[in-house]
Image (tube, grey):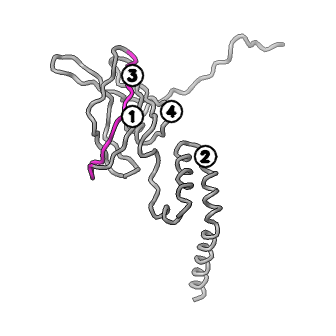
Amino acid sequence: MAEDISEPPKVEQAPVSSISMAEFLETKPPGAWHNISDVQEATTIRGGGRFWRLKTPPLLLYFWTSCFSPLLGEQNFSGSGANRTLNTFTVYVCSNCHRTTKTFSLHARTNDDEDDEGKAFKYGELPAFGPATPTRLLKILGKNRDIFMKGRRCESKSLGIGAFVYYRRVVEEQRTAILGQIINVAKTIGRRRLQ
């Protein structure tokens, strides 16, 4: 008996959950769309009208491990009705030193007039997404620092194979020094056990 293929089988998809604008900016790497629960916020003006602006919440960014607050003024959505869009740069400044900045390049789209929900796409950010590399590690790497940093950039963009290639080159260049340090530690531990 032949199988009926006139209609494709229905596959139930899990509902796509929304994240907050703060979580999007703090934890998501550039290059993908995300559903945002609070992409915009309404502001009432004196005449009773309302306009919508991009929500710029305070952030706790891992790069500097300090709080940030918005530096620039309001970024307003253009158009009216459903699916208003905005392309913007949003700059945050460190609330501790008031000098260090973090810039996000964003595309945001609202769902409709009365709702704060929408979608956002992060084109990029400067300094680049990802945790900071300790200065001590960079000193140890010496001339291999640039190769290691290329690997970190690949890793932060979810390019695992690319990161592996760069990290492997660093390990191959540093293997003599690494093995020498392991031998020194083993000798030191061996001496302490004999005493």
Question: Residue 40: which quarter of the image?
Answer: top left
Residue type marked 1: Ser
Q: Which residue is mark 1?
A: 20
Residue linked to disc 3: 85
Q: Which residues are magenta?
A: 82-98
N-terminal label among 2 and 4: 4
Could you tell which of marks 1 and 2 lies nearer the N-terminus?
A: 1
Based on the displayed image, in which of its 4 quarters is residue 82 positioned?
A: top left
Comparing marks 1 and 3, which lies closer to the viewer?
Answer: 3
Task: Reply above or below: 133 against 182.
Answer: above
* Residue type (three-letter) at the residue carrying disc 3: Thr
In this picture, residue 77 sits left or right of residue 150: left
| Residue type marked 2 | Gly
Residue behind mark 4: 32
Q: CA distance from mark 3 to mark 4?
A: 16 Å
Residue 168 among magenta residues: no
Contact between marks 1 and 2 (CB within 8 A): the answer is no
Residue displayed at 59% across by 43% down: 159
Farthest residue, direction front:
143
Per the image, label 1 sits on a secondary structure element best described as loop
Report the amino acid beneath label 4.
Answer: Ala
Which tag, 2 or 3, sits closer to the chain's start? 3
Q: Position of residue 33 (x, y in %)?
A: 49, 30
Where does label 2 land, which residue?
A: 160
Mark closer to the observer (1, 2): 2
Check the picture and name the quadrant holding the C terminus. bottom right
